[in-house]
Image (cartoon, rainbow, N blue to C red):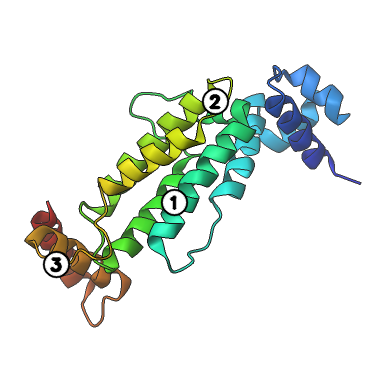
Amino acid sequence: MQNARDRLLLAAAEMLDGGGTVSTRAVCERAGVQAPTLYHHFGSKQGLIDAVLNHGFTQYTAVESSGDPLGDLREGWDRHVRFGLEHPSFYGLLYGRAEPGKPCAVTAPAHAALRERFTEAATRGLLKVPADDAAEQVLAANVGVTLTLISRPEPDFALSERVREAALAGVLRTATESPTDRASTALTLRALVADDPGDLTPGERALLGELLDRLAR
């Protein structure tokens, strides 16, 4: 039998996924508990909603590297779109409540995972721009196309693929292109040093990283 905390999470998740209004009274009735139990476990109704969103979003961002950065980036994009289409109410809450100057803690893992994939691509000489910039550009495109598809009667997956390839082409070079310019060489070396600092001291790593970042830009 589920404990009270799990019942509250499940009740809120079902109500959010169904597009219904999540009131303290309704979610407690559905979970078979009293309001003080909700406050005990989550502090507030918003705390419960944040816990549901964080749990659901973590499930889709938890993807191990396959060793193929480009393939992982494409799969990550498609998983993001599918998650949004399968859970539009969740997705709307995640990306529809942006506050100026306040990053969303729930979606931060998605950005971090994307940055890791681009850092991996950089170690192979495939990156045209710094990993942070690449992650921000591609995530912005990914969110935009997902919201667009959610709003349509029938999702156009061909549109998602076109936007995906255009976004990736803007930050990645092809495997047959060798990084010959100073900036791309600096990006590759930056990623390699971060992955394997060797005998460099923390101070030396920081100095080298600063120099390589300047060269990369």
Query: Closer to the observer: label 1 or label 3?
Result: 1
**Residue located at (35% from left, 45% from top):** 165
**What residue is at 58 percent from the left and 24 percent from the top?**
154
Residue under the image location 40 percent in, 35 percent down: 103
From the image, state whether disc 2 or disc 3 is nearer to you: 2
In this view, the residue farthest toward the bottom is 199
- Residue type, numbered disc 2: Ile
Circle 2 packing at 10 Å, graded few (<14), some (14-19), many (20+), is many
**Residue 42 in the image, given as x and y percentages of width and height:** 68, 35
- Residue 203 placement (x, y as % from top left): 18, 69
Which of the two labelled residues, at mark 1 and mark 2, occupies the earlier sequence position?
1
Give the labeled residue for mark 3: 208
User: Label 1 sits on what residue type?
Assistant: Arg
* Marker disc for residue 74: 1
Residue labelled with disc 2: 150
As drawn, 182 above or below 153: below
Asked whether disc 2 touches disc 3, contact meaning CB atoms under 8 Å apart, the reply is no
**Mark 3 residue crowding within 10 angstroms, few (<14) / some (14–19) / many (20+):** some
CA neighbours of label 1 inside 10 A, class few (<14), some (14 to 19), many (20+): some
Q: Nearer the viewer, residue 105 or 190?
A: 190
Question: Is tag 2's residue or tag 3's residue first in the polypeptide sequence?
Answer: 2
Please name the amino acid that badge 3 sits on: Leu
Q: CA distance from mark 1 to mark 3?
A: 31 Å
